[in-house]
Amino acid sequence: MSLISYLHVVMTTRLAELRRDGERGDSPVPTAVIIFGLVFVATIVTGLALGKANDWMKAIPNHTNPK
């Protein structure tokens, strides 16, 4: 019976802690803005990588693109 009492106290304490922090998860920046920023940065990084890869391939002598 002491195990059940212990688990009850632990769960009650944890729920009280979670209720106390009612502001958790509220961000001043909306999720859509964060996602847009991540997509924007990923697009820039992808473009830079593609540019570097093209420059690298053009540096190979006698290189022709496959048809």
Image: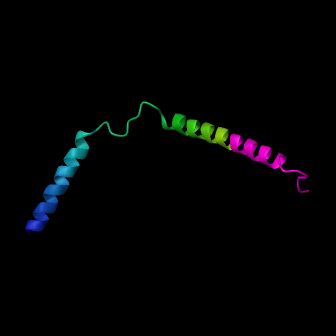
In reply to whether residue 19 is colored magenta, the answer given is: no
* x 57%, y 36%: residue: 37
Q: Looking at the rendering, which quadrant does residue 47 occupy?
A: top right
Q: Which residues are magenta?
A: 47-67
Is residue 54 within the magenta segment?
A: yes
**Residue situated in front as seen by the camera: 62 or 3:** 62
Q: Could you tell me which residue is drawn at 19 percent across and 56 percent down?
A: 11
Outermost residue to the top: 28
Q: Position of residue 41 (x, y in %)?
A: 61, 38
Taking the view exactly as shown, the residue that stands out farthest to the front is: 61
When asked about the image quadrant of residue 24, the answer is top left
Residue 46 picture location, percent across and down: 68, 44
- List x then y, in percent, for residue 50: 73, 45
Quadrant where the N terminus lies?
Answer: bottom left
Q: Which residue: 38% across, 36% down? A: 26
32 in relation to 7, above or below? above
